[in-house]
Image (cartoon, coloured by chain):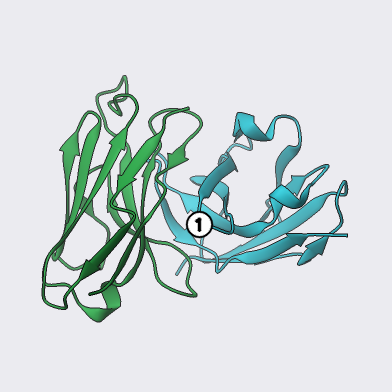
Amino acid sequence: DVVMTQTPVSLPVSLGGQASISCRSSQSLVHSNGNTYLHWYLQKPGQSPQLLIYRVSNRFSGVPDRFSGSGSGTDFTLKISRVEPEDLGDYYCLQSTHFPWTFGGGTKLELK
Amino acid sequence: EVQLQESGPGLVKPSQSLSLTCSVTGYSITSNYWGWIRKFPGNKMEWMGYISYSGSTSYNPSLKSRISITRDTSKNQFFLQLNSVTTEDTATYYCARCRSGSYYFDYWGQGVMVTVSS
């Protein structure tokens, strides 16, 4: 299975500040068709996960442009600028290039 | 608007079967893929499997032969059955829609917590 290593596990931030979360895969996430199926989710307390970014860098409908995704191959990053209270929660990356699809271990974004 | 709702028992005895239903409104399950994901205590998330628009399935090998995902298109529902459960199957179970071609889960149910205990 592809192991998705997310860092850090916990990320204290100040409101208005910037946050960066890393997701590294144990093998390349470039599919044989040339696409890279790496996605980012936020799970707020008491809610189901919500899609933020799909296929590395595409913001899902309604997601503020404070969220941005980048990366390639095995190394991916989610950046959040101007952190707001509603951004706090658990962030996960998901790879759907290789079966079985696998999630990162999660990053808790919390107030400093 | 696409909405998904899980239902099923919140408590299952060890060695028995876990059965959950996902009811979908606002979109036909004969399009795209429809999956089950679970989140364990301690926050690890696991993709369990999906059923496609055509009815074909794909499962996580970690679940071996214990898992089955089926559907009823007339009711716009799909189902999860997990056999021979143990306490390690205690988790919150989510159903979600997976977009064809991009393979991300965009709409999720609210989740149902299932505890395996005698």
Q: Residue, x 44% and y 70% (percent of image)?
A: B1
| Camera-side residue of B70 and B53 | B70
Number of labels in the image equals: 1
Residue on which the image places disc 1: B43
**Taking B87 as reference, is A73 left or right?**
left
| Residue B3, position as x, y percentages in the image | 52, 68
Residue B75 showing in the rendered view: no
Q: Residue furthest top?
A: A32
Q: Left or right of A85: which side holds B53?
A: right
Output the letter for the chain in cyan: B
Q: Quadrant of the C terminus of chain B?
A: bottom right
Q: Is residue A41 above or below residue A73?
A: below
Give the quarter of the image for residue A91: bottom left
Chain letter, green in picture: A
Q: Look at 74% across and 62% down and name the residue there.
A: B115
At x 44%, y 74%, the residue is A45
